[in-house]
Image: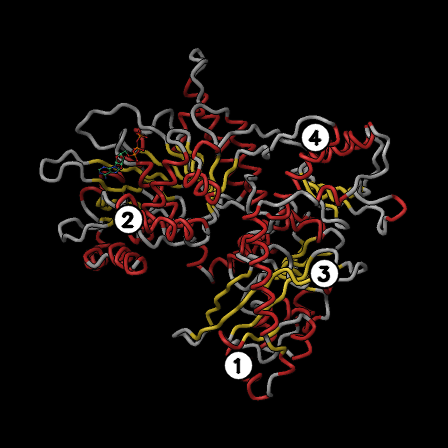
Amino acid sequence: QSSLHQIPFSSRGLLTCSRFLHRLRGTPCIPTRRPTDVFLAHNLIRNYKKDAKSTVEFPLSPITVTDIKLYLRSKDVPFHDGYSCLHVPSVFVDPSQRRDGFSLFVDKTTGQFLCKDTLVEGSWEDLQDCLEVMQKDEQDSLSPHVLLGYPESLEEQEERERGLREVQGIWSRSVPFADLPEEEGQLVKTMFQITKISNATLKKFGVRLFKPTKSLVFPWFGGPDSSLKGIKLLSAQMTDAEKVAYNEAMVPKCSSYFNLFGLALVSRMDSEVVVTGSELDALAVSQGTGLPSVALPRGVSCLPPALLPYLEQFKRVTLWLGGDIRSWEASKIFSRKLGLRRCALVRPGEFQPCPLEALSQGKNLSRIVKAAIPAAHKSIVSFKQLREDVYGELMNTDQVAGVKWTRFPELNRILKGHRKGELTVFTGPTGSGKTTFISELALDLCMQGVNTLWGSFEINNVRLAKIMLTQFAMQRLEENLEQYDFWADKFEELPLYFMTFHGQQNIKTVMDTMQHAVYLYDINHVIIDNLQFMMGQENLSVDKFAVQDHIIGVFRKFATNSSCHVTLIIHPRKEEDDRELQTASIFGSAKASQEADNVLILQEKKLVTCPGRRSLQVTKNRFDGDVGIFPLDFIKSSLTFSTPIKGKHKLRKVAAKPENEEEAQGKADEAPLKKDEGKKEKATKTAKASPAVKSQANGSEKAK
Ligand SMILES: Nc1ncnc2c1ncn2[C@@H]1O[C@H](COP(=O)(O)OP(=O)(O)OP(=O)(O)O)[C@@H](O)[C@H]1O
């Protein structure tokens, strides 16, 4: 079982290669697992269910493109330096049969390889093994059939066959648009708001209608024979605001549906492509511009590196991922993976909505694509270059403020949302529930599509996943074990990953792992629990504060450079028992609070009236300066926190930019500023009918 389970391209090839090579070398065949420190929620749940001990750690040895090039040169292997990959003659194709001389692609960041002719793939170590064996045995190539001939487990085989049968079943019962009666075709088009998409375009991309569920069917062709590998079903629903809400389902299950839609229409000679965030957008671009267009299988949420070899042939890649800020941010991040030099980005805005909308509004799509801005930017810019960005931010203030929590409306009110590229420092008294609280906070975001990576050094991943699963299900699963599979199946679908570290760790190793995860899974949020586990224990002579400052600086840089939010849990320094914590109570020097964009403190009240009552205090908010405090109630059965509904615990909020944080905290505790008094009334009312409580009710409704 590979730890990189979600990328089907990789898993079987890897295992196969290693086993095969052991056979070739005559060494014993050891079931190898990939060296990785990142683990999927999927695996954890599986292991949790079956074999908790199989979460073995493997050291990740980071590889650089220079290492790869040096090695290839040492083996006399020619290569072309591509955008994201090195192109190498495939070792799995006989030299006399090589159609395209350089069909094996080695990812410059990870060393993973893919042979586009045979679809053999594997890790950098696997490729090195192949080359060593070929050299030793003086062979020109290795047989791909032996590699791919590795028997699947019965379970895997059955699942694959079941998936394919389902795909075929739906596909054969779906109707091409041209075969629909004129009136019915128009009705469906109106429902999906695709009246401007012609039947010819739908036919070109093979889009059909599955009548039983009134869904559009998008085929995914793959493999050397370009056969039907999977389908995406799209259903549409009208929302109150006269907008269409789409619902997607993939067959086979989404984890194995992993290629670009529209790829089969791209010719080897094409040198330009438009990448879109949805299949309908790809149709619109194709019709509106005549250019090749492909859609990302999981929309703007990620660009898996496994897809990069398929985009290597293009000299110009235009990313037109949608019409909102999220698409814009994603296009900037994806262009780094694709190589900035060749990428151009369509900036969303009033005159440049998503491609489908642009087509519906009769806009000139070719002109929009031509006007896309180059992704590579200079380090010094003038306001002229920034003015569009500033305008975009002013126009979309709500989106700029970030993803909103559904379970913590009060936090939205103070922090406004969860934004990329920020550093949050979180502290609280020992054993007060920091891990439990942050777990729910992160889960809330993850459930909304924020790709999340946990670095839990204090408690092991199984325990952490158990806490998260309980919070996800909002109930004690110990007492409802029959519901375990139901919740675990849903939990598996979350974009949630865990580092497999436990105990003291070296900051460099943790950083390498985080970079690796950002590249592979487009991680948007990393949680480190907690910083003290990176400080090292052996070297007590070294200045502890200097070490901590260095580590915080490294995390700060990572958050900014990777556009990834980092939440750092830091223990407080020893405080007197009856005093609440302050920003200055964070262990170490002032560096942590200076570098942080947000400082959150879990306060534990030592009151006689309500002993143990927790509150969450925001003492720093760089985004807009609002700070404040609100009470939290702990529900032990679900391990969740929510706002108490009793009137006496009011939401308190203070205005922007306090002179110093202690003062701000004092103000927050004592009296809300005047300008907030009107709002305070409202806030109290809101707190009474707390959406957090409501959302819990909804959650249990859903659970039922
Ligand atoms: N508000 C709360 N009231 C009572 N118990 C709580 C509360 N929050 C968490 N707990 C429980 O307290 C225990 C410790 O919680 P947790 O590990 O989250 O604390 P922590 O602050 O992260 O601890 P540490 O200081 O060791 O890192 C857990 O059993 C958890 O279920």
Work out how far the residue at label 3 is from the one at label 4, CA to CA, in angstroms.
Answer: 32 Å
**Closer-to-camera residue (570/31):** 31
The residue located at (48%, 72%) in the rendering is 236
Work out how far the residue at label 2 is from the one at label 4, CA to CA, in angstroms.
Answer: 46 Å
Neighbour class for label 2 at 10 Å: few (<14), some, many (≥20)?
few
Mark 2 vs 1, N-terminal side: 1
The residue located at (56%, 88%) in the rendering is 183
Residue receiving disc 3: 226
Which of discs 3 and 2 lies nearer the camera? The answer is 2
Residue 480 tag number: 2
Residue 252 placement (x, y as % from top left): 56, 58
The residue located at (85%, 47%) in the rendering is 101
Secondary structure, mark 2, is: helix
Q: Is residue 546 above or below residue 489?
A: above
Work out how far the residue at label 4 is from the one at label 1, CA to CA, in angstroms.
Answer: 58 Å
> Is the shortest distance between ligand 1 and the CB of mark 2 under 8 Å?
no
Look at the image and name its color scheme: secondary structure
Q: Is residue 506 among the parts visible in the rendering? A: yes
Amino acid type of the residue that numbered disc 4 sits on in the rendered structure: His
Work out how far the residue at label 3 is from the one at label 2, CA to CA, in angstroms.
Answer: 46 Å
